[in-house]
Amino acid sequence: GAVVSQHPSRVICKSGTSVKIECRSLDFQATTMFWYRQFPKQSLMLMATSNEGSKATYEQGVEKDKFLINHASLTLSTLTVTSAHPEDSSFYICSAKPGTGLYNSPLHFGNGTRLTVT
Amino acid sequence: GESVGLHLPTLSVQEGDNSIINCAYSNSASDYFIWYKQESGKGPQFIIDIRSNMDKRQGQRVTVLLNKTVKHLSLQIAATQPGDSAVYFCAETSPARNQAGTALIFGKGTTLSVSS
């Protein structure tokens, strides 16, 4: 149980275009999902908290107009990288946990999306 | 077995050895901790967690130790196998971070390499 699916797994786009990444909780409902970013050989950095039916909460230094998050339902959150540039190339990973979130329960992660901007 | 006193980015062990991976955290308010395993090109996979009212928790071949006094967490893997080769991250959170669902903050990873 508690499977998080992310799509696509890899995407290559040209500079200036936008890319949408989907994150779905397959067997549970998630009021809250989280988006992380990971550069090669580095740790996961929290980008934003995605809340179903309300605005996302962004971490300091993350541009909300560049990384658009939409949590349209209890099983789907999307991250759109707008006007992508080569420096946006990274591994984007979403996560979620079942229920309305006892904070002390583990997050389940998708398998990530490798974004390459040329 | 191999022991790491401070955080090191890499740890190399022989198959069958015990491995110890260390992690230091800075937020004294953190009260929930998780170890994740990440294989190349994949998302993190849950290994074991521990709450701050405990100092030790055991799973299958893995043990997590928590020392709140020095804000230190360790993961012990018994009889390490080649399939254990991966990057290991500790993660922490606190109730103050947010209410509804709490994001985890990840520490620096340790790359475990197991040779047979």
Image (cartoon, coloured by chain):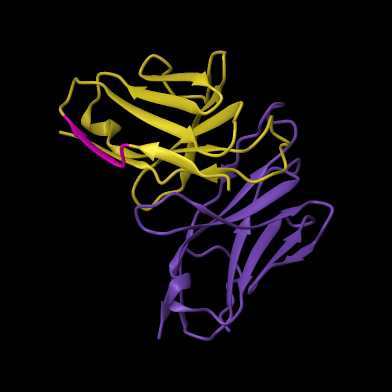
Q: Chain B appears what colour?
A: purple
Query: What residue lies at 71% left-to-right and 37% top-to-bottom?
Result: A103
Asked whether B94 falls inside the magenta stretch, the response is no
Please tell me in which quadrant of the rendered image residue B86 appears.
bottom left
For this view, does B32 lie left or right of residue A13? right
Query: What residue lies at 47% left-to-right and 44% top-to-bottom?
Result: A44
Please tell me in which quadrant of the rendered image residue A38 appears.
top left
Main secondary structure of the magenta stretch: strand
Q: Residue farthest to the right? A: B53
For this view, does B35 lie left or right of residue A22? right
Horizontal and vertical percent position of residue B82 = 43, 77
Compared with A113, A61 (above or below) is above
Q: Residue farthest to the front? A: A27
Horizontal and vertical percent position of residue B68 = 78, 55
Query: What residue lies at 44% left-to-right and 20% top-to-bottom?
Result: A69
Compared with A9, A29 (above or below) is above
Query: What residue lies at 55% left-to-right and 30% top-to-bottom?
Result: A33
For this view, does A50 lie left or right of residue A19? right
Magenta stretch in the rendered image: A8-13
Residue placed most toward the observer, B5 or A26: A26
Residue placed most toward the observer, B50 or B8: B50
Q: Chain A appears what colour?
A: yellow
